């Protein structure tokens, strides 16, 4: 998917919501466990319930890999079921030497036909650039995360006083463009989102942490907004596990609708729609 197509989806759906498809056999409604493929049946129902309110889906690959071959089949079926006009994110956090990265890219871009994949930048340029060689595909680089251990490395300052996450931003921005490179920026560090935006003003951000993890949508937009919206705000647990009963898809729809309506009001305030 191109940047222009993504922006058009945001305008058409009046939403910049990304729904995380983190299907956990220990959390999905128990009646689905009787089906042949519980993970796919769960995802299918969630997609049917939320597809009109989101512009992206983000399956966390770990939830599928841990199930072996069956999990990969569930993932493939899920990705094939997602409407083609919705942006797909393989949340895989890959990052290895060049040749290995090329094969990771082939896995997610050619075999699974995802629009994007999350990348860990620790190994540098040759671990990221192979993902940038695929037309209309995106690399989403981990920049500033909100997990407890993120300060172990991301906040380390160099001799100029720049934190490591800023060095990552400056370096990687030269390897790709705003047309094929995004950044993961955690929602729970609202003011620092503004610091990230000042370094990469044109790029889209994938923002986890709104909702169940305590991040504020208003703060994310206050600090992370750009002229093209520039935000894909992810919600996983707050939507997909709104209920663990037979009404789970209806409850998921209700939660997605609430977020979409909130986003629509922000888009209107920003005169984006």
Image: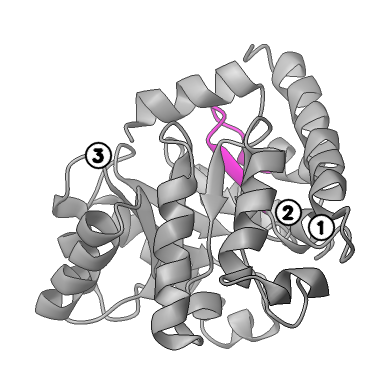
At 87% from the left and 58% from the top, the residue drawn is 246
* Image x and y of residue 65, in percent: 45, 82
Location of mark 3 (residue): 136
Which-is-in-front pick, marks 1 and 2? 1
Label 2, label 3: how many angstroms apart (C-alpha)? 30 Å
On whether residue 107 falls in the magenta region, the answer is no
Side (left or right) of 55 relative to 73: right
115 is higher (above) or lower (below) than 2: below
In the rendered structure, are the residues bearing label 1 and label 3 in contact, judged by CB atoms less than 8 Å apart? no
Mark number displayed over residue 238: 1
The residue lying toward the viewer, choosing from 177 and 107, is 107
For residue 13, which quarter of the picture? top right
Q: Against 11, is 25 above or below?
A: below
- Tell me if mark 3 has few (under 14), some (14-19) or many (20+) residues whose alpha carbon lies within 10 angstroms of its own: some
Tell me the element at label 1: helix
> Which image quadrant is residue 35 in?
bottom right
Query: In the rendered structure, which segment of residues is drawn in magenta?
Result: 223-234
The N terminus sits in image quarter? top left
Q: CA distance from mark 1 to mark 3?
A: 30 Å
Tell me, yes or no, whether the two marked residues, 1 and 2, touch with CB atoms within 8 Å.
Answer: no
Residue 199 in the image: state x and y as whole percent. Answer: 45, 48
> Residue at label 2?
190
């Amino acid at each position: 998917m191109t940047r222009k197509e993504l922006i058009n989806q945001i305008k058409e759906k009046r939403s910049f919501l990304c729904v995380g498809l983190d299907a956990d056999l220990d959390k999905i409604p128990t009646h689905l466990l009787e089906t042949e493929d519980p993970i796919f049946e769960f995802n299918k129902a969630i997609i049917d319930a939320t597809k009109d309110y989101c512009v992206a889906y983000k399956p966390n690959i770990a939830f599928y890999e841990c199930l072996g071959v069956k999990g990969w089949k569930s993932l493939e079926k899920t990705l094939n079921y997602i409407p083609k006009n919705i942006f797909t994110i393989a949340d895989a956090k890959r990052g290895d030497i060049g040749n290995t990265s090329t094969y990771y890219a082939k896995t997610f871009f050619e075999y699974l036909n995802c629009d994007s994949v999350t990348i860990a930048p620790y190994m540098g340029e040759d671990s990221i650039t192979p993902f940038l060689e695929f037309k209309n595909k995106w690399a989403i680089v981990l920049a500033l995360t909100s997990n407890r251990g993120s300060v172990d490395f991301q906040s380390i300052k160099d001799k100029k006083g720049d934190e490591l996450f800023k060095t990552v931003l400056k370096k990687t921005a030269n390897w790709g463009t705003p047309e094929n490179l995004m950044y993961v920026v955690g929602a729970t560090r609202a003011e620092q989102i503004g610091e990230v935006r000042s370094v990469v003003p044109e790029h889209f951000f994938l923002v986890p942490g709104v909702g169940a993890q305590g991040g504020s949508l208003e703060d994310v937009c206050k600090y992370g907004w750009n002229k093209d919206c520039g935000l894909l705000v992810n919600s996983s647990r707050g939507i997909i596990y709104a209920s663990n009963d037979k009404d789970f898809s209806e409850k998921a729809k209700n939660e997605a609708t609430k977020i979409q309506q909130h986003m629509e009001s922000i888009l209107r305030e920003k005169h984006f729609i």
